[in-house]
Image: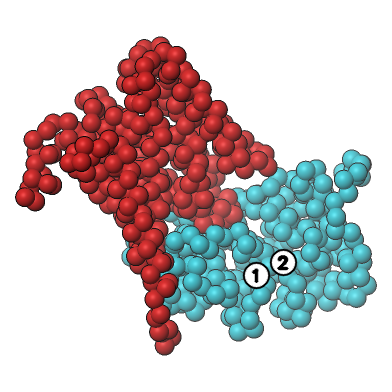
Chain colours: A cyan, B red
Amino acid sequence: MTEQLKFRNLTLGYDRHPAVHHLDGAVRTGSLTAVVGPNGAGKSTLFKGVVGVIKPLAGRIERNGVRPQDIAYLPQVAEIDRSFPISVYDMVAMGLWRGKGLFGGIGAKDRDTVEGALAAVGLTGFEQRPIGTLSGGQMQRMLFARLLLQDARVIVLDEPFNAIDTKTCADLLLLVRRWHSEQRTVLAAMHDMELVKANFPESLLLAREPVAWGATADVLTPENMLKARRMCEAFDEQAQACVVAA
Amino acid sequence: MLYDTLIAPVAEFEFMRRALVGTFALALGAPPIGVFLMLRRMSLIGDAMAHAILPGAAIGFMIAGLSLFAMAGGGLIAGLIVALGAGLISRSTQIKEDASLAAFFLISLALGVTIVSVKGSNVDLLHFLFGSVLAMDDPTLMLIVGIASVSLVALALIWRPLVLECVDPGFLRSVSRAGGPAHIAFLALVVMNLVGGFQALGTLLAVGIMMLPAVISRFWARDITGMIGVAIGSAAVSGYAGLLVSYHLNLPSGPGIVLVAGALYAVSVVAGPAGGLIWLALPQRHLEA
């Protein structure tokens, strides 16, 4: 059993205030893990750390030879400028970036791959639509198509099923299961506990500090959930420098 | 008759031909930059940058008189300092780019006008503020054409990260480190094109041939490739029509070019197929699906 991601006394945050505090542990290669916790628990922050967008305030992340930019990352939808005049096809094709880089051409074979990804998420026929005309669910399908093209060993999904209807959610979960069966390592921030229990073998319950981590049934107990909810969300402006030994 | 109106002025007078070559070169280089500025909600930043160029050009003028290279070089250096400084500040602090540039805008304009007035005459000042599109010599043309060529090639090279940084910066950061360098290269292109436009249209109107075609394009095309095509086309038409109007009606040429672009803009706002006012006002039956 190899470990794809190892967190060593990891602290991530903004302006020296920790959003993820002293996280230790490992994510096994090929595991499918739900990251759960209240808003402000540090789920997005942890993911940003994993993909290298923010640097740790302390501790470190070991990625077992995978470069941060080779991790497929689904950010929260809010970061996308939906008024930008770009087609669904072009947006999905950006998923080929790792193979094509800045200048690589998109050939006939690549076009087939893009079409295949669009078909896999049920967006065939949407190729030339501007992204601004998509509904929330279609938008998420498009982003999953882009993730498919990234063909990454590690996939990080930040609240992938928020505000998505059950049909779309079920379709996209099929893709997540497919990645899991292909031995890819998948992390997903989740709020729907029923979905987590039904689909994610492992869970990490986060409330700035790790509350529990392991088999989903052991993690999502009422006691653990209550504990997570009690952790305060606001930054303390008067906080002292943290002195917990590394 | 048509020949006399449209062709003869250009065929007969060399200064008209030079002006036309210059404006066409500007029309190729500047509008694509303007489209990106608009899509990044940085439309007014072009304006601020154009003014930031003025004191640099004015210092060049103070040292070497009306020398192209002193003025263009001074403008380029001043513009790059402001652009990179503002870009770095906004990337490393919470201050937004427009806020830091807004300050430079007024200071630079005042400083530039002061320097030119102390050293030169009112005619020089007019040249600085509004350009002299009808008096472009060979080096000036070479400079403008060179800038247009460099900027088209550079835009092709940084196209992917530039587009991606507009539409999905988070994704770009997660796959590549090219966002920062592309952004800086883009700001450098803005400055270069404004220095080119400055020669022809002056500090106050150089932005006109960059931003007006960009805004026009939004009313005619729905994807970025089409928008850039429309922007280049409308800039070229504005340049040509503007020169002819100024020739026939004996009006100043730079403002003529920008006014024609302004007229195209007005038409686009009203009748452009992508969101023009009449299409919104006309009662249209909704579609079946």
Residue A62 image offset from top left, x and y in percent = 71, 50
Residue A50 image offset from top left, x and y in percent = 68, 54
Task: Identify which residue, B251 or A101, lies in the foreground.
Answer: B251
- Among the two numbered marks 2 and 1 on one chain, the one whose residue lies closer to the N terminus: 1
For residue B254, the mark is none
> Callout 1: 10 Å neighbours few (<14), some, many (20+)?
many
Pointers 2 and 1 in contact (C-beta within 8 Å): yes
Q: Quadrant of the C terminus of chain B?
A: bottom left
Residue type pointed to by label 1:
Pro
Q: Residue at x 12, y 46 (%)?
A: B5
- The residue identified by callout 1 is A160
Regarding mark 1 in the picture, which secondary structure is present there? loop
> Callout 2: 10 Å neighbours few (<14), some, many (20+)?
many
Whether residue B10 is situated above or below residue A117 in the rendered picture: above
In the displayed structure image, the side of residue A2 where residue B288 appears, left or right: left
Task: Identify which residue, A121 or A24, lies in the foreground.
Answer: A121
Task: Spot the residue most to the bottom.
Answer: B288
Q: Residue at x 60, y 84 (%)?
A: A167
Residue A39 visible at all: yes
Residue A75: name its quadrant. bottom right
Marked residue chain, label 2? A
Residue type pointed to by label 2:
Ala
Regarding mark 2 in the picture, which secondary structure is present there? strand
Residue B161 visible at all: no
- The residue identified by callout 2 is A189
The Cα atoms of the two marked residues, 2 and 1, are separated by 7 Å
Q: Residue at x 28, y 41 (%)?
A: B256
In the displayed structure image, the side of residue A94 where residue B238 appears, left or right: left
In the displayed structure image, the side of residue B16 where residue B67 appears, left or right: right
Residue B132 image offset from top left, x and y in percent = 29, 29
